[in-house]
Image (cartoon, coloured by chain):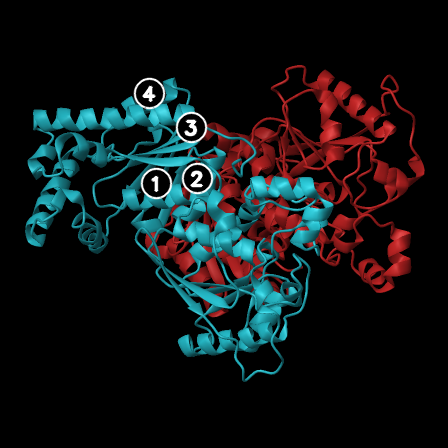
Chain colours: A red, B cyan
Amino acid sequence: MQPVGPEAEKLVLVMVGLPARGKSYTARKVARYLTWLGYRTRVFNVGEYRRARFGAKVAHDFFDPENAHGREARRTAAMAALADLQQWLRRDGDVAIYDATNSTVERRAMVRERCTLAGFDVLYLEIFCEDEAQIDATVRETKLTSPDYAGVPEATAIADFRARIAHYERAYEPLQEDEGSYLRVKNRGEHVTAHRVHGYVASRLGFLLMNLHLNDRPIWLTRHGESMFNVAGLIGGDADLSPDGQRYAHSLADHLDACYPDTDALKIWTSSLRRALQTANPLGRKSTSWRALDEIDAGVCDGMSYAQIEAEMPDEYAARQHDKFTYRYPRGESYVDVIHRLDPVIIEIERVRRPVLVIAHQAVLRALYAYFMGVEPERCPHLPIPLHTVIKLTPHAYGCHEERVPLEPNTAASGTGGDRASRHASQ
Amino acid sequence: MQPVGPEAEKLVLVMVGLPARGKSYTARKVARYLTWLGYRTRVFNVGEYRRARFGAKVAHDFFDPENAHGREARRTAAMAALADLQQWLRRDGDVAIYDATNSTVERRAMVRERCTLAGFDVLYLEIFCEDEAQIDATVRETKLTSPDYAGVPEATAIADFRARIAHYERAYEPLQEDEGSYLRVKNRGEHVTAHRVHGYVASRLGFLLMNLHLNDRPIWLTRHGESMFNVAGLIGGDADLSPDGQRYAHSLADHLDACYPDTDALKIWTSSLRRALQTANPLGRKSTSWRALDEIDAGVCDGMSYAQIEAEMPDEYAARQHDKFTYRYPRGESYVDVIHRLDPVIIEIERVRRPVLVIAHQAVLRALYAYFMGVEPERCPHLPIPLHTVIKLTPHAYGCHEERVPLEPNTAASGTGGDRASRHASQ
């Protein structure tokens, strides 16, 4: 998959920061975003190398900088991770994230030198937190469930981990301006600094890093109600809702009215197409229409059925079957194109703090779903996003909790049923 | 014009910084960018109010914080500008930029309070510079040409301005984290900090602010060579070049080969359409194809002539004549849509330091041209971007220098001429 930017770079993102500041959380979030944008991205976590080589159960004095054995063992793990990182980046990757404390100038200089010699760009990503409550929450949420403390009583684990942090604090040297390009994030995005950041990938991350707070309000995704084109088995177009589709719009309104009686509590975004606007209508609430949410553009195939494409354009049909992800309709779009134009939508969803309802289309919702659920983008074209089902995604530390609510079209609304068999004609 | 973001905000950007740090340069650049994106943006420069009320020729001691008369006069000018700003923002604007030193905590608190009471969001934009050579260059480039020093010998003007800066330096209090949301830019984008930045407009600015260095390498804009659709007077499509178009591609290659013998010295970006790719071809250099550079999507009118649209879709034809800027082709795009999708291209052009050649299409180039030349976006549809002419834009402090080079199709290349009369069929 080609990256979104005009030119690919081989980049090493070197995490910097004390334990329990949110490095791994940030590394994963960044990796998910860059992967979704088409960069082959992988996190190399030095803690995992250390556990694989020296076992999970090591006491805090392993991390004491005065402990020569521990220091050497930790260095060995760090070097092994770095060697794997370089090999992967050279052969298969676009962006590698080196997830370790990298807490001294000396260590960072060594990592930088090795990466630069190998021809990679280096960007530090320092995670800084002075909010004790936040640090405490991170320790409890992530470290207690770490293999390092499996089976260890909570109080013991916390005391040990606090002692481990103290060892690092003694040696910690915050990033200096003369060390090179960096992004520094303080208190989960409250304060973000970019120093000598010029690369394309790096400059894409600023937005995301301003929104690292855990935004756990739900995101609701739904396709428009069944349209007359769905009934006829045609793709694209700008058709009205079918009678069944109208009834779904009423069911959706009932469901969301019950969840959010306060009309300002939910943001509603639709595409600019009639079937999406008509689906929002019975809600009777303010909504915003985004062209970026319009369905994948089927180009010259717009308004055709799949059978017709197969009969009249067999080469196109075959090319699409062969690789539905990168296939671009003649004069239209591919899934890759759709992902790129959805980037501002993702950034905006990450930014707003209120629940959001997105009323859009199959291909577009597959792409949004892939971002939130961390699905490889290549699997997008095969994700099931059925009609007349609202999907509720609730973010948590490392992903989203998913709930699917099929809503029967509200029979209290007027109209007669369409042909349901054709509902699942798939873009 | 609707703004690019899903929700409009009324925002006051309050500049902060000592004289000659680049506040006005930044304010203008930000205003140009936001205007282009569709936000009604205006800069209110307190210096202009001061000159209008108290005359341009005041000696540096007018700016001495110990000078009660000068202090009161400057405060009067500042309040008059703020009152006008508020009135404009309430009635007509989206983003107002308050361009003054705002160098004390007290002054900023007062400005913030007045704006907040009026219901506006406030974001500080602090311009900080510790590079003496840069400050000196700003003094020489901008202050010597200011009305404040019209007719004053250079050495006298510089000495007076330095004394003026010194007065401000005595009173200057850098922004503190508890003062609210801010963006701080140091040394022309080398170092950018975002503190509690959550608004959509504000978060759009990060990219731009990372690239405030004066990037004076030229940007070359050209339409593809004449296409077979141009010859036939049809809009849209994905036609091949005409013989004349092919000859233009060769002339373009000759011209740029002469300007940039080093093949790495020029970045070449094309749209993804055949006529643009074929125009890049004779250059024989690496180029990048962007879908974002594709011509305005004429939707259902793609492949028609204007006469045909007038005959078959008179309402559409009339709507387009009435407002060519916001008119959206059925199932296609408007100029407003084109501007929004070009945003990443602008950001990327601002970022790269090498000369860039953009081979694209009439509507797309009108939108890019409007950004660089600071033309109101509403005028986009009427900007002349003829075929077979390369436009060279060279940025300087407050805009771009423009040069247009009409290139005769290279008759050394093969093929016969097309019908030139139809070249100017206008999107």
Q: What is the count of numbered marks?
A: 4
Tell me which chain the residue with mark 3 is part of: B
Q: Secondary structure at mark 4?
A: helix
Q: Residue at x 52, y 49 (%)?
A: B381
Quarter-of-image position of residue B116: top left
Q: Which residue is mark 4?
A: B113
Residue A229 relative to residue B152: left or right:
right
Identify the image quadrant of the N terminus of chain A.
bottom right
- What's the chain of the residue with tag 2? A
Quadrant for residue B177, please give it: top left
Q: CA distance from mark 2 to mark 4?
A: 43 Å
What residue does disc 3 label? B92
The one nearer the camera, A280 or B200, is A280
- The mark found on residue A166 in the picture is 2
Percent position of residue A326, x then y: 72, 58
Residues at circles 4 and 3 in contact by the CB criterion of under 8 Å: no
Q: Position of residue A341 (x, y in %)?
A: 62, 47
Residue type at tag 4: Glu
Labels 2 and 3 share a subunit: no
Horizontal arrangement in the rendering, residue B286 relative to residue B189 (left or right): right
Q: Chain of mark 4?
A: B
Q: In screen coordinates, is B330 left or right of A48? A: right
Residue tagged by mark 1? B184
**Residue flagged by tag 3: what amino acid is it?**
Asp
**Which marked residue is nearer to the observer: mark 2 or mark 3?**
3
